[in-house]
Image: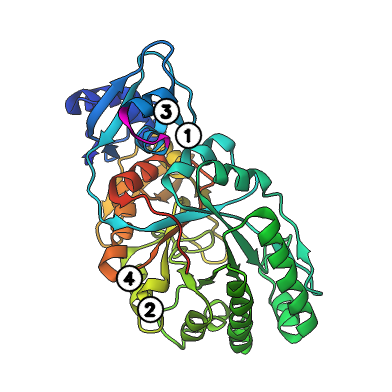
Amino acid sequence: MILHTVTSGETLTAVANRYGVPVRNLAADNGVTVPEQLPVGMVLLVAEPLATHTVTAGETLYAIAKRYGISLRTLWRNNLFLTGSADLRAGDILYLDVKAERIGGYSVGGYVYPFVQRPLLEQTMPLISGIMPFTYGFREDGSLLDLNDEEIINTAFRYSVSPVMHLSTLTENGNFSTALARALFASPEAEARLTEELLATLRKKGYYALDVDFEFLGAENAEAYATFLSRLRTRMNAEGFPVLAALAPKTSDDQAGALYEGHDYAAIGEAVNSVLLMTYEWGYTYGPPMAVSPIMPVRRVVEYALTRIPAKKIFLGISNYGYDFVLPYVQGTSRARSISVEEAILLAGQVGAEIMYDESAQAPFFDYTDDGTQHRVWFEDARSLSARLRLMPEYGLRGALYWNFMRPNPQNLALINSLLYPQTLNLW
């Protein structure tokens, strides 16, 4: 894996020729849709093939895999232009093997909404071990609200990926309901009904595990939440289902704020099989311009978590998006636009912005002006994502979960392929 920083006037073809790789493969690995408009400062991930095969007329992906004794999953991982399909055309150059810099084998997964685009889902599946359709809800009486997740689950099965059922207190208006959680904790009947309906759904749809995400509970509900999770885990584990719980990004026991106070790291870490540290959203829609997941705050959350929860239970949260902030920032008024990594790079090329890299935050950004209004865009690239993934071996963590896989970022998939050994999801 080579990380090449684009200089003024460089084209994708020039970079591909420099490293002796096909333009199509390089474009697919980096989500480049306008090869002649590479922004200065953009980082291209160059996968270095160790062995290749040029497709001839009539050849199938299955026959090629059999000929070389490799799996379809390996071909999909090495060749993102296939987008997880078996479609080939004569002249395609397939990477049979690529030079890798493996940091270990880790469980990697992420979240998607039911309306995720199918080609994107199929391109992502060979690179991950778990997928979480977002999200199941419930009513005050404990009855479960269904989710149109069948296509995601069936796709997961086709690619040997473990689907994980996601339960939250998120309501139709997009907010986490403290009142709904409080009502559940206060009613043994509602809790019993929810538990049994969860089990029935897990069994019926073939889910591997349960992921619980109750947010903004406040200190008054912290103990009840941990107790609920403990009872839930006991029941789920007895039926063969591990339980994961999402945790707000805390750095101390007494961190103020309803988001943080409702999550007792020690109690929840004891109550469940695994936890997800939601280490993102320092830069967010209503906040000041900054990186979504600056490396030092992420480290502080991990280091605090390790004082309360065993490393083998911890999954790191990874952001897979960015924000377009308007300058100057006005608290209570400013609102940043969420932007995909692919959109950010395309925008930088369109406006002629140079992409810079903040070493302290370990994140890329650029500035531009639109109709007299100044903007700053923070997003992720192979450098920033690599810095966060490398925290897993440094701290001995179990794996990583992405928020989210809804928008294309093939460079991240190519990075996973270069850094991580494929591994099945393990939440126990």
Image disc number at residue 299: 4
For residue 66, say whether it is visible: yes
In depth, the one of 27 and 193 nearer the eye is 193
Which residue is tagged 1? 84
Distance of label 1 from label 3 (alpha carbons): 19 Å
Q: Quadrant of residue 133?
A: bottom right
**Mark 4 vs 3, N-terminal side:** 3
Instruction: Kindly indicate whether the residue at mark 1 contacts the one at mark 2 (C-beta within 8 angstroms).
Output: no
Distance of label 2 from label 3 (alpha carbons): 43 Å
Which residue is tagged 3? 33
Q: Is residue 179 above or below residue 286?
A: below
Distance of label 2 from label 1 (alpha carbons): 36 Å
Image disc number at residue 310: 2
Answer few, some or many: residues within 10 Å of disc 4's Cα (few below 14, many 20 plus, some between 14 and 19).
some
Chain part drawn in magenta: 68-72
Residue shown at the point (38%, 78%) measured from the top left: 310
**Mark 2 vs 4, N-terminal side:** 4
